[in-house]
C-alpha cells in the first residue's frame, strides 16, 4: 500500500477536474476474452468512519484507489456527504462525476435501499419504482454499468412468501427500467434481512425473471447462507455465474461481525479459498466488475490491497 496523497496535491487534482471535460464512460459491452475490472467500495470507508470513528478524506481514498490500479468505485448514498443528487440536478451530477474522473476512476455502481420494493401497500411499491427510475437516470449520467439493490426492512404484516412475490414483481419492473437505460439492476440479501437464505435468493432471482435483473455475489453472505462451511462457491455454482451482475469480494470467517451482518475480512484472513470463487467466475465467463467489499473492516486500505492481489493472481493463473 502506497502512502496517501498530500492535501496540496489533492487540491491540484481537484482543480484539474474542474477544468477538464468529463470522460466518456458508457455502459459498454465487453468483447470475448476481456478481463474483469476492479473497484473499491466506498461502503467500507463509510462503515469504518461510523464504527471505528476513523477519518477517511475522500481525496485520500480516491488517490489510493487510482495509485493501486483500481479502475472504479461503487458509491454509497450517505457518504462522504449527504444523499445522491436528483437526476434533474445536472450541475451537481456533473460535478460528482468529474470528481472521480479526475482520478481516472469510473463510478460503476450506486447502492440503493429497496425496502419499498416489497412494501405491502401497492402505493409504496409504486413510489419506490418512481424513485428508482430517477436513480437509473442518475446512474446513466454518472457512467455506471449497474445499480445495487438492498431489500432490507421488516415484513410489515406480510408472510415471507407474499414479500418474495411482491419483491420479485417490483424487481422485474426495475430490471425493465435498467435495461431500457443499458444498465443492470443487481440485488443482494444478507443474514440480518428477512430474505436470508439460498432459497430466498433463488426465488427472488427467478421470480423477477428479467435478463437485466441479476444477483450480486458476496462470498461472506453466500458462506453464511450455506452453513458457514467456507465454500461459498458451491452456492455460486447453483445460482449460476451467468446470473451474477457484479461481485462484492472479500473473505470471511463464517461468523457475524458484532451481531450484525456477515463478517468481511481481507482475502487470506478467513476460512474461504478465495481463488476457487474467482476461478469459477472466470471459467463461467464472468467479465463484469469485482468490487472489494471492506464492510466494517478495521483497515479497509489493507483489505483492498490483499483482495486485489488475490483477484489479479486469479486472472493470471
Image (tube, rainbow, N blue to C red):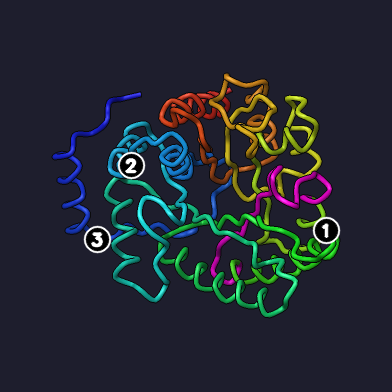
What residue is shown with label 2? 62
Quarter-of-image position of residue 256: top right
What residue is shown with label 1? 160
User: Which residue shows up at 67% across the image and 73% down it?
Assistant: 125
- Residue 218 % position (x, y): 64, 39
Q: Calculate the distance from the C-alpha at mark 3 to the C-alpha at mark 2.
A: 19 Å
What residue is shown with label 3? 21
User: Which residue shows up at 54% across the image and 50% down it?
Assistant: 30
Would you say the residues marked 1 and 2 are in contact, meaning their CB atoms lie under 8 Å apart?
no
**Which of the two labelled residues, at mark 1 and mark 2, occupies the earlier sequence position?**
2
Would you say the residues marked 3 and 2 are in contact, meaning their CB atoms lie under 8 Å apart?
no
The quadrant in which the N terminus is found is: top left
Label 1 secondary element: helix
Which residues fall within the magenta stretch? Answer: 179-201
* Res. 173 visible in picture: yes
In the picture, measured across the screen, residue 104 lies left or right of residue 43, that is: left
Amino acid at each position: 500500500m502506497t502512502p496517501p496523497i498530500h492535501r496540496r496535491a489533492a487540491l491540484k487534482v481537484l482543480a484539474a477536474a474542474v477544468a477538464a471535460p468529463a470522460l466518456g464512460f458508457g455502459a459498454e459491452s465487453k468483447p470475448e476474452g476481456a478481463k474483469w475490472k476492479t473497484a473499491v467500495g466506498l461502503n467500507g470507508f463509510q462503515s469504518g468512519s461510523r464504527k471505528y470513528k476513523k477519518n477517511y478524506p475522500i481525496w485520500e481514498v480516491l488517490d489510493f484507489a487510482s495509485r493501486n490500479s483500481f479502475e472504479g468505485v461503487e458509491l454509497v448514498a450517505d457518504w462522504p456527504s449527504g444523499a445522491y443528487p436528483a437526476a434533474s440536478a445536472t450541475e451537481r451530477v456533473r460535478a460528482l462525476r468529474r470528481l472521480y474522473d479526475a482520478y481516472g476512476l469510473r463510478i460503476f455502481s450506486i447502492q440503493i435501499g429497496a425496502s419499498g420494493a416489497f412494501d405491502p401497500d401497492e402505493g409504496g411499491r409504486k413510489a419506490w419504482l418512481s424513485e428508482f427510475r430517477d436513480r437509473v437516470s442518475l446512474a446513466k449520467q454518472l457512467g455506471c454499468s449497474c445499480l445495487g439493490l438492498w431489500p432490507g426492512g421488516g415484513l410489515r404484516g406480510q408472510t415471507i412468501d407474499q414479500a418474495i412475490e411482491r419483491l420479485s414483481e417490483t424487481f422485474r419492473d426495475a430490471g425493465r427500467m435498467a435495461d431500457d437505460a443499458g444498465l443492470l439492476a443487481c440485488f443482494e440479501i444478507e443474514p440480518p434481512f428477512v430474505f436470508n437464505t439460498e432459497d430466498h435468493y433463488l426465488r427472488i432471482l427467478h421470480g423477477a425473471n428479467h435478463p437485466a435483473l441479476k444477483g450480486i455475489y458476496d462470498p461472506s453472505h453466500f458462506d453464511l447462507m450455506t452453513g458457514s462451511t467456507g465454500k461459498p462457491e458451491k452456492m455460486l455454482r447453483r445460482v449460476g455465474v451467468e446470473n451474477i451482475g457484479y461481485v462484492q469480494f472479500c473473505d470471511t470467517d463464517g461468523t457475524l461481525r458484532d451481531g450484525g451482518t456477515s463478517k468481511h475480512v481481507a482475502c487470506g484472513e478467513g476460512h474461504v479459498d478465495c481463488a476457487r470463487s474467482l476461478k469459477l467466475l472466470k471459467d463461467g465467463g464472468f467479465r463484469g466488475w469485482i468490487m472489494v467489499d471492506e464492510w466494517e473492516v478495521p483497515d479497509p486500505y489493507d483489505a483492498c490491497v490483499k483482495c486485489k492481489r488475490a483477484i489479479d493472481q486469479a486472472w493470471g493463473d
